[in-house]
Amino acid sequence: MGRVPRVCAAVAGNPIEHSSTPDLFRIVARFLQKSGHNITFDACEKISNDILVDALAWGHAMNSAITREDKGAYRGRREIWLSLTAPLKHQLPIDSSPEWILGDPMLASVNQMRHDGHVWLAAETDGDGLLMVAEEFGFDFSLKDDLDKPLLCMIGGGSTARACAAAWATASGKIWWEGGRRPLSSRGPWRNSLVDTSDVCDHVGRRLHVDFDQLPGTEAEIIGESMKAENDAPVFLSIPYSGGEFEAVIENEWGVHLNGRWLLVAQHLKAWEYLFFPEATDNLPTLREAMELLSSVEM
């Protein structure tokens, strides 16, 4: 089946205690075993860290220690797979040496890195992950009329927000920036997709609301009685999530509310597709399959 890597994997950032990423690494690896792909994790950890260089050093140190323990018994290539969250995502210098597999280095946002045994590779999968979630819930980016195109109603201008805005614009969606702790530059790759506040009322297409300024490790408060939402109801996607049991989708009179794990799972699957194990792309679980598997682990 080709490459059979042994991997030191981790998610790094701060706070990190609530992260479900180690579970996702194992879930996807087990799923791929059904198709004959075998990945061995020599480590699969959470690294509480504020500095990207230290997270990269952890990978090299862990890999070297395991190699010494094996005393050369394993002749294949060992790899380091890292998922990055705040505050590490903006710390990779624009002019640094890693080869970019997905994303734009100029956005100063990286959330996945892999050392393949020779060089570091980098990717930003939040943007493609957001599109994956949107398409799962019926957003149609093929519509031609500007008033019908999917509208991203977003708060925030940090690394995740920039990456998602760029991907949304590339998919021909429209963007209404509502403000936030950090500004979203009007000169970014999304500049031609921005909608003025005065024009939002005229928009008739589907809307996805995302507050990128929500604090990590929290759950969005959902107000209103649970009920079946209309097919064209607005969708509210939470970015953060907390540990423990969760409801993946909550519908009420305000719209469809998605747990923050939807984006987590989607961007993780995109990391496998483009960076970690692209040769198994056709065998990866779907977004809903991965969500169901994660739910069964966390119950």
Image: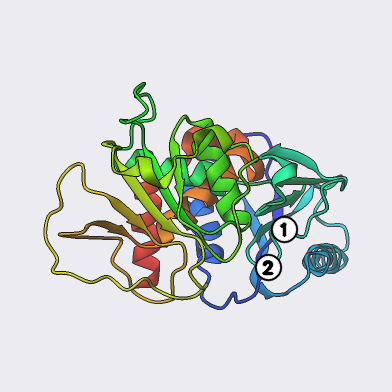
- Residue 19 lies, with reference to residue 90, above or below; the image says below
Instruction: Identify the residue at the far front of this view.
Output: 198
Q: Which of 28 and 2 is in front in this view?
A: 28
Q: Position of residue 278 (x, y in %)?
A: 61, 36
Rendering coords of residue 231 (x, y %): 17, 42
Q: Do the residues labelled 1 and 2 touch (CB within 8 Å)?
A: yes
Work out whether residue 157 or residue 116 is closer to the camera in this orientation and state it.
157
| Mark 2 surroundings: few (<14), some (14-19) or many (≥20) residues within 10 A | some
Q: Which amino acid does label 1 sit on?
A: His
Residue at 29% x, 37% y is: 202
Lateral position of residue 149 relative to residue 127, left or right: left
Q: Give coordinates of residue 92: x percent, y percent.
A: 79, 55
Residue 250: image tag: none
> Which residue is under mark 1?
90
| Residue corresponding to mark 2 | 87
Q: What residue type is labelled 2?
A: Pro
Image-based side of 247 in relation to 86, left or right: left
